Amino acid sequence: MTDLSKIALFKALVFDLDGTLIDSEPSHLNAWNEILKDVGLPPMDWDYIQSVGGISSAQICRMRCEAAGRTDLDPVKTARRKTDLYISKYLDTIPLFEPIAKILEDGKKRGQKIAVATGSQLHETTRLLTRLHLIDKIDAIVTSDQVKHCKPAPDTYIEAAKRLGVAPSDCLVFEDTNVGLQGIKAAGMTALQVADGKIISDYLKP
């Protein structure tokens, strides 16, 4: 069993958003499949959406277009359509994973620095965190539209540490996907993997 008391030993806590702090992946899957059907691309299944968690929407769409040989589609514009649909139809219904949110809130009370590091975009992330009453508890937000290289590159996490004013080695990151864990390791940070609002790993050292 993971010793959660060790969470307090880190200067900063960094949280992935989708699938870690919020239960949004079913809604992402629904939005993707509505758009993919409309443009004539094969649908995604749950295993696929899990495998690409943390990768930007534009990159996911580029991968789908390449796999289907669809050079006629603009992956950036198609991904933007998916994001717009997700925001308009699903965003205001997405719940927190309460156990992970409590870790965030407890860390803030202890005086730890708090960041969100996500493959989502800034406008949707800010809107979500505001609606869920977490925005005032977060010291830094780093999104896919703010870094040159998205997950699994380490840029998102390194930028989060930079904005918090701490060394990467002083950060503990909460993440649900293997894509994200690759970036955390490359950033030189410790991770705890989560699933369905529960911690499922011991401390994963870089």
Image (cartoon, grey):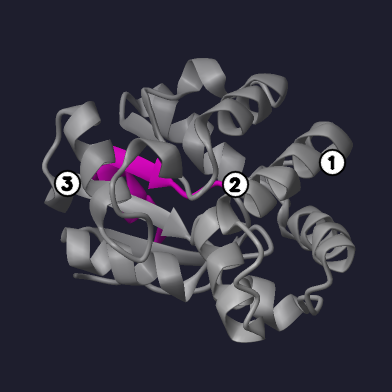
- Sequence-first tag of 1 and 3: 1
Q: Please, is residue 35 above or below residue 111 in the view?
A: below
Residue linked to disc 2: 21
Contact check, label 1 and label 3, Cβ < 8 Å? no
Magenta residues, as a range?
1-17
- Sequence-first tag of 2 and 1: 2
Contact check, label 2 and label 1, Cβ < 8 Å? no
Q: Residue at x 63, y 74 (%)?
A: 64
Residue 30's image quarter?
bottom right
Q: Residues within 10 Å of mark 3 (few under 14, many from 20)?
A: some
| Residue type highlighted by circle 1 | Tyr
Q: Please, is residue 55 above or below residue 16 in the view?
A: below
Q: Residues within 10 Å of mark 2 (few under 14, many from 20)?
A: many
- Sequence-first tag of 2 and 3: 2
Question: How many angstroms separate mark 2 from mark 1 (CA)?
Answer: 16 Å
The C terminus, quarter of image: bottom left
Q: Residue at x 82, y 64 (%)?
A: 39
Q: Residue at x 36, y 36 (%)?
A: 146
| Residue type highlighted by circle 3 | Asp
Residue linked to disc 3: 170
Where is residue 112 shown, x and y percent of the image? 31, 30
| Residue type highlighted by circle 2 | Leu
Residue 188's image quarter?
bottom left
Q: Residues within 10 Å of mark 1 (few under 14, many from 20)?
A: some
Q: Is residue 98 left or right of residue 88?
A: left
From this viewpoint, which residue is outermost toward the front? 72
Which mark is in front, 2 or 3?
2
Please, what secondary structure does the residue beneath circle 2 have? loop
Q: Is residue 203 visible?
A: no
Which of 152/2 is in front?
A: 152
Residue linked to disc 1: 90
